[in-house]
Amino acid sequence: MIRIEPFGKYDKVVLTGEKRNAITRDVLESLLKLGCEREVIVTNEGPVFSAGLDLSVFLESKERVLEYLFTIHKLIKKFLDCDKRIIAYIKGDVYGLGVELLYFFDYVVAASEALKFSLQGINFGLFPPYTVSIGKYLFSYGHLRIMLSRDFTAGEAFRFGIVSEIGQLSPERLFSPPEHIGAFVKAKRWIMERVDEAVPYLYKLAEAATSEETRSRIKKFFAGNRGKS
């Protein structure tokens, strides 16, 4: 699922799980156990950085879906509240919640302009709750229209502001402000004041995600994937 190893002054978290690094409950619990004593680099092995939400959760009860969604929200608030920086180094395609989690990191490096970003969960009936609730504070209207309509590349994500840099990760080039001013210069500090605006949308997502139509689409997706294996 994930592997944690030292990397200089950083803890490197490598996403290695099955389901193309979907954010399963086990992955959430592992990430919630991360301390904020050292700075963190999150990266991946394989062709996918993260497949986003674990679709199988949405075939469970609405109560279980809400528990899952609010665990995600707890993790996001942990990212925002962490004193140390959290940096993403993306070496594969990114889907759904995997895209949204990048909004809450301190710095995001994509290895190639060609990597695919997608919020395609909309096609199942799973709208991206953080994009639709606080995306207006993060992106222009024109960029949101693209993000919610089609797949886009890491090069486009760089222009939108999701990605900070394209190329190889060079953590030694990043600023290292002293501890006593670190909290004041974090770009994500103000997002903490807005992130709970997503809470009503988590309830709406649970409602939409447990509808018969959404569940039917998810089951067809699973059946199609089994047919390809």
Image (tube, rainbow, N blue to C red):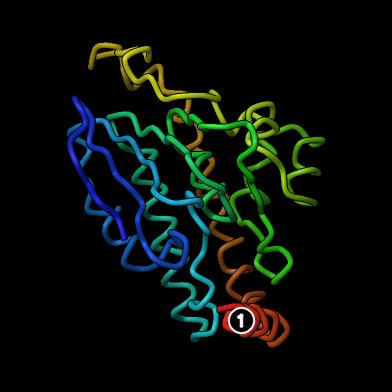
**Residue found 49% across the figure and 46% down from its top:** 101
Q: Which residue is mark 1?
A: 210
Above or below, 167 relative to 141? above
Quadrant assignment for the C terminus: bottom right
**Residue found 36% across the figure and 61% down from its top:** 17
Looking at the picture, how far across and down is residue 189, in whole percent?
Answer: 43, 29
Q: Quadrant of residue 144?
A: top right
Q: Neighbour class for label 1 at 10 Å: few (<14), some, many (≥20)?
A: many
Frontmost residue, 181 versus 146: 146
Mark 1 element type: loop
Looking at the picture, how far across and down is residue 67, in whole percent?
Answer: 41, 72
Q: Quadrant of residue 8?
A: top left
Frontmost residue, 48 versus 81: 48
In the image, taking residue 34 as reference, residue 122 lies left or right, namely right
Looking at the picture, how far across and down is residue 175, in whole percent?
Answer: 36, 12
Q: How many marks?
A: 1
In the image, taking residue 28 as reference, residue 151 lies left or right, namely right
Above or below, 101 relative to 229? above
Above or below, 164 relative to 50? above
Q: Amino acid at mark 1?
A: Thr
Quadrant assignment for the N terminus: bottom left
**Residue found 19% across the figure and 42% down from its top:** 5
Frontmost residue, 11 versus 169: 169
Looking at the picture, how far across and down is residue 170, in whole percent?
Answer: 38, 19
**Residue found 54% across the figure and 84% down from its top:** 59
Above or below, 199 relative to 19? above
In the image, taking residue 193 as reference, residue 228 lies left or right, namely right
